[in-house]
Image: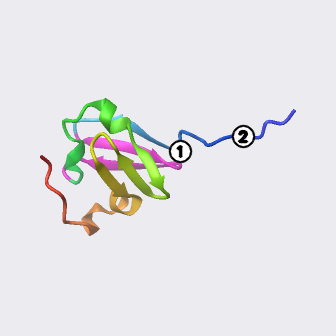
Amino acid sequence: MNLAMRGKNTSEIEVTNISSFGIWMLVHGREYFMSYDEFPWFKDQPVKKIINVKEISPGHFYWPDLDVDLSEEIIKNPERFPLKAKHA
């Protein structure tokens, strides 16, 4: 019997928790926290829009319902990227 995996692993990226402080996202086995202070686009958004995230290229994530795209580098080190778009 051959148990080799077929197809693409669909759970390599997922939002694992949403709290009053921010969101946690699991990316290829690593968990990242995105506070609303650093990532204001996610605050006060419906869960459905936050969990709809796609990895459009390695290390580049897009939330189509929010029109937000972030790199893994920005998520890991938001202090290196002080300029932020204003949240409407």
Q: Is residue 72 magenta?
A: no
Q: Tag 1's secondary structure? A: loop
Direction from residue 55 to residue 65 in the image, left or right: left
**For the view shown, which residue lies furthest in the bottom direction?**
80
Q: Quadrant of residue 79?
A: bottom left
Q: Residues within 10 Å of mark 1 (few under 14, many from 20)?
A: few
Name the residue at 40% across, 44% down.
Answer: 25
- Give me the C-alpha separation between circle 2 and circle 1: 14 Å
Q: Tag 2's secondary structure? A: loop
Name the residue at 23% across, 41% down.
Answer: 21
Where residue 4 appears, x then y in whole percent?
77, 40
Where residue 51 appears, x then y in whole percent?
37, 36
**Above or below: residue 20 compared with residue 13:** above
Q: Which residue is mark 1?
A: 12
The circle on residue 5 is: 2
Q: How many marks?
A: 2
Name the residue at 32% across, 38% down.
Answer: 50
Where residue 43 appears, x then y in whole percent?
20, 40
Query: Which residue range is magenta in the image?
Result: 21-37
Closest to the observer: 86 or 40? Answer: 86
The circle on residue 84 is: none
**Above or below: residue 18 compared with residue 78:** above
